[in-house]
Image (cartoon, helix red, strand yellow):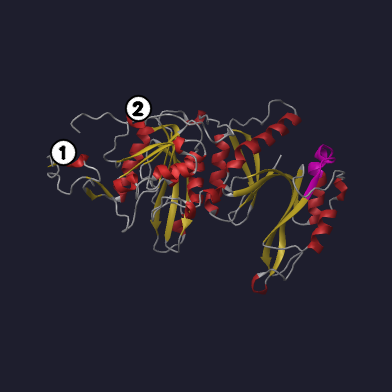
Amino acid sequence: MEYLIRLVQVHEKFRKAEIEALASLHNIELEFVTYEDGSPFCIVRLRTLDGTPLGSGDDDEDRYAGELQACRSFFPRSVLAKAICEVWGRGKDYDELHRDVRRRSAHLWPRYQKRSFRFDLDAYQGKRGPDQLRPIIESFIYIGFTGRIVMARPEERFWIFEEWETSSEGRDCRADQAPSGARIRLKQVYFCRWIANSGRDVIKKYDLKLRKYLSTTSMDSELALVTANLALSAPGKVFYDPFVGTGSFPIACAHFGALTLGSDIDGRTIRGSKAGVNITSNFKQYGLDGHWTGGFIADLTNTPVRAARWLDGIVCDPPYGVREGLKVLGHRDPERGREAVIIDGELAHRAPGYIAPKKPYSFTALLRDLLDFSATTLVDEGRLCLWMPTASETGEEDADSPEFNIPSHPSLHLMFVCLQRFNKCKVLRLIGREDFSSIDVSQTEIWTAPTVYHAPRLHLHPKRSLLRPTSSSE
């Protein structure tokens, strides 16, 4: 069976990677029959990662039920899609569509004929008026629906998707709704049965305009949620952000049920702007405080994180540029800072509000240390999702090439590269790598997450159990 995914036309370079990640999280492999960055419609087929059909039995009925259950399990988490539907037919015009509907889905008609239903039409880059819509709906009368027409909460919802393209000539051409007087023609039309909606509405809940604690570098809520999906955030997993800032990534991962922690070199970011307004208050705002184990002041070269394979994912947006200059803890002069400073009989670095000295740090060194840290701390199949800026003098092919200055590591496998373009020469890339240092990649098994994304509150003390012990003199 083929399924249509209605995508949104934003962040086009991220959409396919997100759908593939969510499917793999549920032990599902997607075959993309059709996909284009410029189109909001893609057609997929589903099967398990080992290639066997979905479902508990060998007959067609069990496989059909298994595929529907699979769609309803992985798709509701998607942020860059709207809905997934069962394809009953498709064609380049309505004559071809009706022939395909009779050929492809006639065996399904009796199953839904007596249920209440409604029809909807979605015309991408086109528009249909009420006088045009009714004849189109009535052209499907041969299916023989006998149930009631219910506009609010029907048992079944059928969609007619039209995709129009600009053209100087062609069938079904219309001059209205076309830019600069150009004519448009029908490129593809689909008839589908709705299965499940996505979780895109959650973007409004985490809108930065409504968040209590922010900084100038807080990640957009939509991209933070997409990053969490690409990192395979799920209940029972632990995620870490070494450049936590105000906690945008940990909040997104916590939304999907993961346990989170973070660190930052700037102690003022961890402590917050004023009493009670900090990262913890952001988690409390969304009722996710049970998923935040705490933050601490550190950088990748001076970290208390235990060097063991216990992290399921690392998500981060490292600082870059002049305003967010890269630095690490330490002195420019290696001879300085070796002696303890005592003020009023107390160690200065233990005083409230202490700001540690910092020294410059190159982005190249940061990438090297981050990849080494990920290879050391990620579990098998754990993922590192890293945002990385790139620039191009021409803004053409080299800026869009996935191989353009992508950092590599012998223990990390490149999973995807997604691009967010700011202008002709500036591109921000989201890079995903998966740890496979101690597994046979040909026999990888993906952990399957339940459909409930919020785990019960866990009482874990990472500073006691997951961080390196320190001596009493430190």
Q: Quadrant of the N terminus?
A: top right
Q: Is residue 116 magenta?
A: yes
Please state the horizontal and vertical placement of residue 304, each as a whole percent of the image: 29, 34
Q: Residue 101 vs residue 55: left or right?
A: right
Q: Give the main secondary structure, helix, strand or loop, of the magenta stretch.
A: helix
Q: Which is nearer the eye, 435 or 222?
A: 222
Mark drawn on residue 74: none
Q: Residue 1 vs residue 348: left or right?
A: right
Q: Residue 84 vs residue 287: left or right?
A: right
Task: In the displayed orientation, state which residue is furthest to the front.
Answer: 275
Please state the horizontal and vertical placement of residue 226, each as a whole percent of the image: 51, 46
The residue pinned by badge 2 equals: 465
Q: Is residue 88 magenta?
A: no
Picture mark count:
2
The residue pinned by badge 1 equals: 346
Front: mark 2 or 1: 1
Residue ID at (49%, 43%): 286
Q: Measured along the vertical axis of the image, is residue 345 above or below residue 215?
A: above
Q: Quadrant of the C terminus?
A: top left
Mark 2 burial class by Cα count in 10 Å: few <14, some 14-19, many 20+: few
Residue ID at (80%, 39%): 108
Mark 1 burial class by Cα count in 10 Å: few <14, some 14-19, many 20+: few
Q: Residue 282 vs residue 332: left or right?
A: right
Q: Earlier in the sequence, mark 2 or mark 1?
A: 1
| Residue 78 in view | yes
| Residue 46 in view | no
Confirm or deny contact between disc 2 and disc 1 (CB under 8 A). Answer: no
Amino acid carrying mark 1 in the image: Glu
- What range is drawn magenta here? 103-118
Quarter residue 461 falls in: top left
Q: Which is nearer the eye, 207 or 176?
A: 207
